[in-house]
Amino acid sequence: MTPDTHHTAEKRNRFKEIPRLAVETLCAYRRDMSTGDALPAAVRQALTAIDEQDTDAFVAAFAPDGFVDDWGRQFRGPERIRSWSDGELIGVHATFSDVAVSTPGNPVTITAQVGGDGYNGTSHFTFDVQGDRIASMTITA
C-alpha cells in the first residue's frame, strides 16, 4: 500500500466509526439513571429507533392519531410521520448527540445536537405522551 492509499483507507475507516460513536454516546446517555428516569418509555423508544435508524420502531412509538410538528408543519398519523421521517430524520441518517432533558414532566423537552445528511444544529424536541405512546413531538430551535 502506498502512503497515499494508506492515508485514504485510514480516512475511510475513521468516517465509518462516526455512526457507531454517535450510537455509543446516546446509549451511554440512556444508561444515565437521572436522565433515563425523566424520559417516558415511548420517548426512549423513539430515541432508540433514531439511534438504530429504524423507521418502523420510530413510527410505532406514536399513537395512531399522533403527530410531528416540525417548525409549524404538522404530520399526523403513521403514514405521514413515516413520510416526514424518510425526508427529514431517519431517511437522512439523523444522529442525536449531547442529549439532555431541558424540561422534565409531561410534556418533556429534550435538547439535542442533530447531525446527519439533513439539518445539523441544536434543536428542542417536546414530547407529549398519552398512555404508552407519543401524542405529539414538536421540534423548535
Image: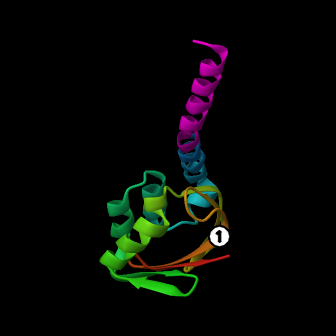
> Which corner quadrant of the image does residue 102 belong to?
bottom right
**Amino acid type, mark 1:** Ser
Q: Secondary structure at mark 1?
A: strand
135 lies left or right of 30: left
> Which corner quadrant of the image does residue 10 belong to?
top right
Choose between 135 and 9: the one closer to the eye: 9
The type of colouring in the image is: rainbow
Residue 19 visible within the image: yes
- Say if the magenta span includes residue 73: no
Q: Return the x and y of residue 69 as percentages of the image width and height.
A: 51, 82
Quadrant in which the C terminus appears: bottom right
Looking at the rendering, the stretch of residues picked out in magenta corresponds to 1-20
Q: Residue at x 47, y 58 (%)?
A: 50
Give the labeled residue for mark 1: 123
* 98 up-or-down from 21: above or below: below
Quadrant in which the N terminus appears: top right
Magenta-drawn stretch, dominant element (helix, strand or loop): helix
Q: Return the x and y of residue 38 as percentages of the image width and height.
A: 58, 66
